[in-house]
Structures are given as C-alpha cells and as structure tokens.
C-alpha cells in the first residue's frame, strides 16, 4: 500500500474499513487457493495483501481505541 493510499484509508470510518478488510480477506483466500493449485505466478502478492490487511486492521483498532478514550474522558 502506497503512502497516499494509506492516508486515504486513515480518513475512512470504521464500517468502511471493516468492509474493505473483509474483501481483502476474501482476496487472500482466493490467492492462497490459486497458489495451491499452482496457478499463481506472483507469490509475493499474498504477503503484500496480508500486509495491507494488517495495516487496515491496525487503523481500525486505533480508531476504536480513540473512541473509547474519548468516552472515558467525558466521564471524568
């Protein structure tokens, strides 16, 4: 994922990010099946997609923690 794509990902809300993460998981599954059937040429594509997924899940978790932190500060 390039820096400008990552910046766009950070601007999305949690629901959109979860949808994108779900589609990435599906892509990784398809790529894995293609690899197992010896049809996949670019084997690094799986690791690239997994890295993108990890970055997306990290952003989701950061946003969730930020919301929890804001709720906690309002109680004080």
Image: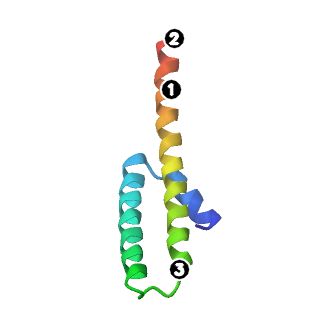
Earlier sequence position, callout 3 versus callout 1: 3
Q: To which residue does mark 2 refer? A: 76
Tags 3 and 2 touching, CB below 8 Å = no
Q: Is residue 75 above or below residue 23?
A: above
Q: Nearer the viewer, residue 67 or 33?
A: 33
Instruction: Tell me the SS state at disc 3.
Output: loop
Image location of residue 73, percent across then percent down: 52, 19
Image location of residue 33, percent across then percent down: 36, 76
Looking at the image, is mark 3 or mark 2 nearer the viewer? 3
Q: To which residue does mark 3 refer? A: 43
Q: Is residue 4 above or below residue 70?
A: below
Instruction: Tell me the SS state at disc 2.
Output: loop
The number of discs equals: 3
Earlier sequence position, callout 2 versus callout 1: 1
For the N terminus, which image quadrant? Answer: bottom right
At a point 53% along the width and 48% down the height, the residue shown is 58
The dot on residue 38 is none
Earlier sequence position, callout 3 versus callout 2: 3
- Circle 2 Cα neighbour tier, 10 Å, few/some/many (<14 / 14–19 / ≥20): few
At a point 55% along the width and 62% down the height, the residue shown is 51
The dot on residue 70 is 1
- For the residues marked 3 and 1, what is the alpha-carbon distance in whole angstroms? 42 Å
Q: Nearer the viewer, residue 71 or 53?
A: 53
At a point 40% along the width and 60% down the height, the residue shown is 20
At a point 59% along the width and 57% down the height, the residue shown is 7
Instruction: Tell me the SS state at disc 1.
Output: helix
């Amino acid at each position: 994922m390039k820096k400008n794509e990552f910046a766009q990902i950070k601007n999305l809300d949690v629901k959109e990010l979860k949808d994108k993460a779900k589609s990435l998981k599906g892509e990784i599954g398809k790529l894995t099946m293609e690899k197992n059937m010896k049809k996949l040429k670019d084997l690094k594509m799986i690791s690239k997609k997994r890295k993108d997924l990890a970055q997306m899940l990290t952003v989701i978790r950061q946003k969730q923690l930020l919301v929890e932190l804001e709720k906690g500060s309002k109680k004080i």
